[in-house]
Image (cartoon, rainbow, N blue to C red):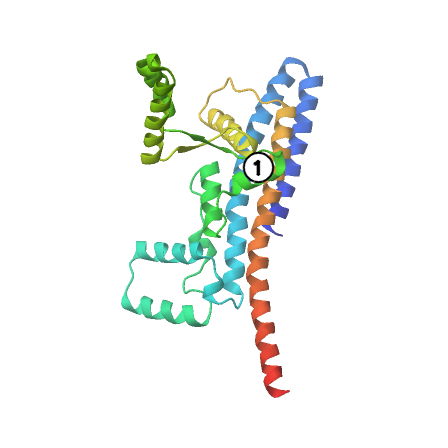
Amino acid sequence: MSAFEDFVENVKDIRAVAGLARDQIMNHGRDGRRVGNVTCRAALVLLCGHFEGFVRDVVREVVADLADGDVESYRVPPGVIKKVLVDKAKKGIDIEFVDQFRESMRHGPPLGLSPKLMISTDSNPTVAKVDELFSILGIEDVIDRLSISHYAIESTYTVDSQSEPFRGRFEKIIGDFGVAGSECCNEVLALIDEKWAPRKKRRNVGYVACIQELLKKRNRIAHGEGGEQITPEELENFCEEIQSLCSGLKAVADSVITTVHASRARERSTKSERWNYLWA
């Protein structure tokens, strides 16, 4: 089974748990409400674990395809090759490896291209971590892209001008100079923005909001904050949103594989046509 198929089956189990918890809450009094809440809390932590595992495994599937297939190194995303070298550098690089790696770059996938060695999460599946893993495949800001597509928003980022916090103070100082003062203020603020680039910050919207809320609740539960209540409905909503996100991530991962193999097929077709032309 693929990473996404495994994830879907796991989510089905969590939905079933939500149904059992709802029955406990509705039909078994005070004890049932306690059991139902504990069950939903545990299931939410499990959902977070399955999400983390999916993100790791779906990226590994792409790397495994590149490693197992007869794919030339120049078609492999640069981030993958960089990860190979970074991982190897941690263990030490000798001349023999350099020679072998250089040779592999000429004839096939880069030496040491192993999904299990390369891809790990080692932490909660934060927005930054998901973006980091997909950037290895050459896909930048994947959470932003999928949020724009699914939620019809403009961006999950906002840009804060470095000069804006000073506007009020400048206007107060030179406010008595009328239009000339206002123009002077704008010129000074423009110089500040020219010198210091605006800061890019995440907005709590789209899949960013979903992931952050899931992890916030997960961490509270895992760290023993007993007051965090999770209803069956809330658990099911998280299942729906996270599965939708994972479906989008799978499509992005598949597109990387498709693009690599399509490029190879086009080049082979072109070479074949040239060969046929020479012998025609």
Left or right relative to 174: residue 278: right
Q: Identify the residue at image location x=57%, y=37%.
A: 147
Please tell me whether residue 27 is drawn above or below residue 45 in the rendered image.
above
Occupied quadrant, residue 185: top left
Occupied quadrant, residue 97: bottom left
Viewer-proximal residue among 273 and 94: 273
Q: Position of residue 115 (x, y in %)?
A: 47, 55
Left or right relative to 111: residue 245: right
Q: Identify the residue at image location x=31%, y=53%.
A: 90
Total number of numbered discs in the rendering = 1
- Circle 1 SS class: helix
Q: Identify the residue at image location x=56%, y=70%.
A: 267
Residue underneath mark 1: 147
Q: Position of residue 121 (x, y in %)?
A: 45, 43
Q: Identify the residue at image location x=49%, y=42%.
A: 141
Please tell me whether residue 129 is drawn above or below residue 191 in the rendered image.
below
Q: What is the three-letter code of the residue carrying label 1? A: Ser
Q: Residue furthest bottom?
A: 279
Q: Quadrant of the C terminus?
A: bottom right
